[in-house]
Image: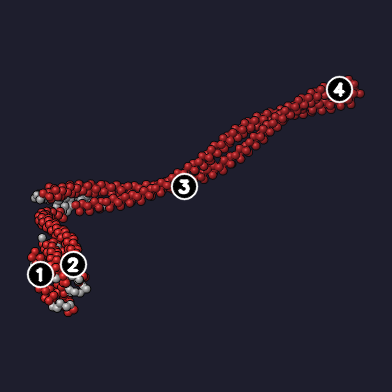
Amino acid sequence: MDELLAVRRNGLKVLAVTCVLATLVIGMGATFAQTGALPLVLALAVSAIPLGLVIQGRADAGTRLAMGSAVAALPMILLYQWSGSALMVDIHMTFFAALAMLAAMADWRPVILAAGLTAVHHLLANFLAPDIVWTGGPALARVLFHAVVVVAETGALVILCEQVARRIQHQAEIRAQAERIEAEAAAERSRSANEQNIVISAIAARLEALARGDLALRMTEPFPPAYEALRASFNAATADLDQLLGRVTAAAGQIATGSSEIRSASDDLARRTEAQASAIAANSEATTTLATGIRATAARAEAVNRTTAEAEADAATGGAVVERAIAAMTAIEQSSSEIAQIVSIIDGIAFQTNLLALNAGVEAARAGEAGKGFAVVATEVRALAQRSADAAQEIKDLISASSAQVGTGVQLVGETGTVLRTIVERVSEIGSAISSIAAESAEQVEALGTVGASFSRIDQVTQQNAAMVEESNAAAHSLLREAETLQDLVARFRLSGDRPAHVAKLSRAA
């Protein structure tokens, strides 16, 4: 209702201003109209009461009806002021405007009053003083036409005023309900604020304890029902954090222990890796030296192989020469046999010659003196035969000795050929063995080259492993420091059971 009253009060103010303006218009028209100052006096009289009520701040039904009467009367006074003028027809429009302006008060009663006053004015004036209403005398038809228009406008304005009033009342009810809801919400907010203050104070105290590292404290005072779940969740979270930090503490100790062991193992591994790298480097160098020596040995074996091949060729050539010598000695032995046969023939001839010489001597002796010369010849022939026999014997002896020596030489040359063939075979076997040695040496050189390359790769990988071990060692040292830092951080918390959250630090290795 306050909203509707405010609307009606504002409408009264607008209509009051309209009355003032209409009175001013009537006052200015008094100078030009023939009716004198009477219309102005009537306007002031009609407007005085509602204006006074509006100035007093009133907006009740009486004030609204008085304002409706004044607004309806002012067009009547204006029409009277300009009676007999051509403006009378136009002034009739002010009646409809006045009715419409009354809707500003959102009250249908002033509209009905103004419409009734307008109808009575037109009807009475049409019969009693038609000149103040129409030009040209009474006009009942015009009165009826205006009445129909006024009724239609009045009906519309009444409906409009009623709808506006209801809408304002409905809005007022809605606003009142909203205010009531707001009040209830404010009360609920106040209650919630009180509960929140209680909860916040408890949580703030617990958070302060938590900030000091106290995880053993729990909130035992019950919260309001709406926040009880928060208390349980907070206690559960604190318990979980307590348990988690306990596990973190144990894990930190284990990490520190493991880090220390890893650090020691990394140090040992670094030393062993360094020693292994040195040993591998020495092995690689020794393998390279051995490969160089084997390569030189292979070269020398190849040279010996070539020399052996040449010796084998020379031995084969010597064997061929010995074979030819054996053949020549065999031929000499055959020639000696043939010479012995010839000597035997010569010896036989000498013997026969000696016999012939002996017979010739015998025959010369028989011949006597005549056969002396023949006896001398026979003697000389006999002597010659004897010397031939002696020479043949000596030649035979020489040939026999020569044949024996040739036989011995043939036997020795044969044995020499056998030995040379054996030497050739052994030289061939030695050549094959040396060739095999040279080939195997070349393969060993290649294998040692591969081993050397493998040692180089192993050395490189070992160096990389050594670098990785150094990095692992550094990481192990860093992990140990971080574990000790974690122990220091966890040590500030007090866990459940009033037990310290920290554990004894492991002694750092030098």
Check disc 1 and give the amino acid type.
Pro
Left or right? Give the position of 161 relative to 393.
left
Q: In this picture, is 135 found above or below 175?
A: below
- Which comes sooner in the sequence, label 1 or label 2? 1
Which element carries disc 2, helix, strand or loop?
Answer: loop
Disc sitting over residue 50 in the figure: 1
- Which comes sooner in the sequence, label 4 or label 2? 2
The nearer-to-camera label among 4 and 2 is 2
- Which comes sooner in the sequence, label 4 or label 1? 1
CA gap, disc 4 and disc 2:
238 Å
Residue 357 image point, x, y percent: 84, 23
Disc sitting over residue 360 in the figure: 4
Residue 464 image point, x, y percent: 38, 49
384 or 476, which lies in front?
A: 476
- Which comes sooner in the sequence, label 1 or label 3? 1
Disc sitting over residue 289 in the figure: 3
Badge 1: few (under 14), some or many (20 or more) residues near its Cα, within 10 Å?
many
- Which comes sooner in the sequence, label 4 or label 3? 3
Q: Quadrant of the N terminus?
A: bottom left
Q: Residue at x 13, y 54 (%)?
A: 203
Badge 2: few (under 14), some or many (20 or more) residues near its Cα, within 10 Å?
some
CA gap, disc 4 and disc 3:
101 Å
CA gap, disc 4 and disc 1:
230 Å
Which element carries disc 4, helix, strand or loop?
Answer: helix
Which element carries disc 1, helix, strand or loop?
Answer: helix
Check disc 4 and give the amino acid type.
Ala
Disc sitting over residue 226 in the figure: none
CA gap, disc 1 and disc 2:
33 Å
